[in-house]
Structure formats: C-alpha cells, structure tokens
Image (tube, helix red, strand yellow):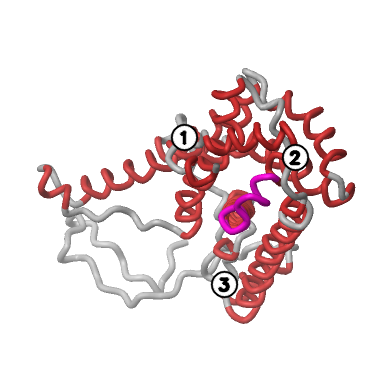
Amino acid sequence: MPDKDLPPLPHERSPSLLSMQLVDPSPVEETPQPIPSDPEQQHQSKSNPYFPPFHPSRTSSSSAPSIPQTLLTLQKYSTYPLLAFLGLHITNTSLIPLFTRSLHTSDTYLLLTRPYYQSAVLEKALILAPIAVHTLSGVALRIYRRRQTAKRHGASTHTERQRIPWPGVSAQSKLGYALWPLVAGHVVVNRVVPLQVEGGSSGVGLRYVAHGFAKHPVVANVGYAVLVAVGVWHVIGGAAKWARVSPEYVVEGGDYGVRKRRKRRWVINGTIVGVYLVWIAGGLGVVGRGGAGVGWEAKNWDYLYASVPLVGRWLS
C-alpha cells in the first residue's frame, strides 16, 4: 500500500527541475566492518574508523607491469645474487680470520671457495651483472619519473624541461652512489691489477691485503673502514626497505605508531652497527694487523700495488 505520509506524484506532467524538491542531507549509515584479529589493525580501526588500514604492499592490478614496476623489480631482485656473494665475502675476509686468528689458515679457505665466484660465468652472474642492473635500473627510474613530471607540467621544449627539477635523492640512493668509487677502487686493487699483471688472482689473498695495510696504514685503514661502513649501511638499509620493515612503512598513528617507528629504527640501526663491528673486527683487527710480507712474495706484492692506475707510484 502507498504510504499516506508521502506526497502524491504528479501524473499530469513528467517530472522536471521545477517539480524536484530540496531535502536536508542525512548521514549515510556506516557499513559495519569485520573486527580485525591483528592488534595493530585493531588500533588503526579504532583511531580512524572511517578509513581502512593502509597496506603499502598492495598495488592496483593490471594486465601488464608498468615501466616503474619493471624497473623496481629489476632493482630489487638484482640484489639477491649480490647478497649471496656478500655472505661468502664476509665469511672469507672477516669471520674465518676472526675465529682462526691465522692468515695462512684463512687464506686456505679463501682459495678453496674463491674459484667458484671468480669463474668466467659466476663472476659475471653474481657480481658484475647484478651491480650493473641494480645501478642502471635506479638511474632509469629517476629519468622516467622526471619525464613524467615534465609531461604533467606540459613542458614540451628543451628549455621548459630543463626547468623541471630532478626527483629528490634519498639517503639510501646517496649511499649507493658513494659506494661506487669505493667498490671500484677495491676491485681494481684486488682483482683487475692482479688479472692484468699476473693473469689471475691466485697469488692474491688475505696476506696480500695485510701487506697493503702494513705498507700504507692510513690509506688502507681509512679506506677499508669507510668502504665497509657505507656498504653495510646501504645493503641492510635497502634490505629493510625491500622487506617493508623500515620505519616509513608504519601506518599506525598516535603514540603506538611513534613507538613502532622508533623500535624499527633501533633494530635496523643496531643490525647495521653489529654487522659493521663484526666485519671490522675480522678485517682490521686480524687481517689489518697481519704485517708485511717477506721475500719474493713481498716484492711481487709491491709490484702489484705499484701497478695500480693513477696512484700506483705512491703505493710502491
């Protein structure tokens, strides 16, 4: 039955703007949401009931990945072979010397495992190609984002595009760029020069590194400490971002969110400091104090250091 409280509809004429009436706005009933089982999500729902919890890992689905998604995927997964190599490297150059306290014994383990990741195939697959992909994908992503910004601003000419600022460089990216010359110098001294002079690195081990520390203590100690610090900070900080456990992925508000961000920051920074101290303890505490070589080995190592491009005459 029709409701008597409602006015009858005019049947004589079709409804028009003149026949419409203004009504007062009424609140829309809130759709009940299920209570989350996670305490953090419960806190988020209570503090902001009109907005669902934000999940940074969820992205809009599409049939094909976009250019930024492709570049980010390349940048992320290119770090996996590097992490495997770094695990071997810290074991050979820090952990084993730290436990054995002998460079001769440590060199035995180093020479047993090094041929695997210095082979013609694995060296490129584990080290060279991942570093190139990781770096170039990051640079390409910055260029792409700047071009997208120029399109949004309608910059069509070269002069207009020059006025568009580049995207900001994060602290993590700055560490990566700073790591490039440090790693390059390390590779030239310990891999490129022996390969060019002797045809391989069979005569280069931890005692060769110790010989360099003894001959040039200031340059070697400072350079090594900076290399390890920047490398550990970049790798662990980047791994925390890829795993979405860094402080910026905390979405809760209020005191709970502040405490959670602080806790994550302490855990990440504590991990960085812990790994750095362990690496330095084995690298500088044991290898760095191994002393200079003697006899024909010392003369051969001096010749290798003197063959380093640009700075070899100061290292001889």
Quarter of the figure with residue 284? bottom right
Q: Position of residue 200 (x, y in %)?
A: 64, 22
Say if residue 55 shows up in the picture: no
Of marks 2 and 3, which one's residue comes earlier in the chain?
3
Closer to the camera in the image, 37 or 167: 167
- Cα distance, mark 2 to mark 3? 74 Å
Q: Which mark is residue 49?
A: 3
Which comes before the other along the chain, label 3 or label 1? Answer: 3
The residue sitting at 32% across, 70% down in the picture is 7
Q: Secondary structure at mark 1?
A: helix
State the image coordinates of residue 21 (x, y, percent, origin top left).
24, 71
**How far from the left and from the top, in percent, is residue 265?**
64, 68
Helix, strand or loop at label 2? It is loop
Magenta segment range?
211-222
Q: Circle 2 sits on which residue?
A: 294
Type of the residue with mark 2: Val
Observer-nearest of 156 and 88? 88
Mark 2 against mark 3, which lies toward the viewer?
2
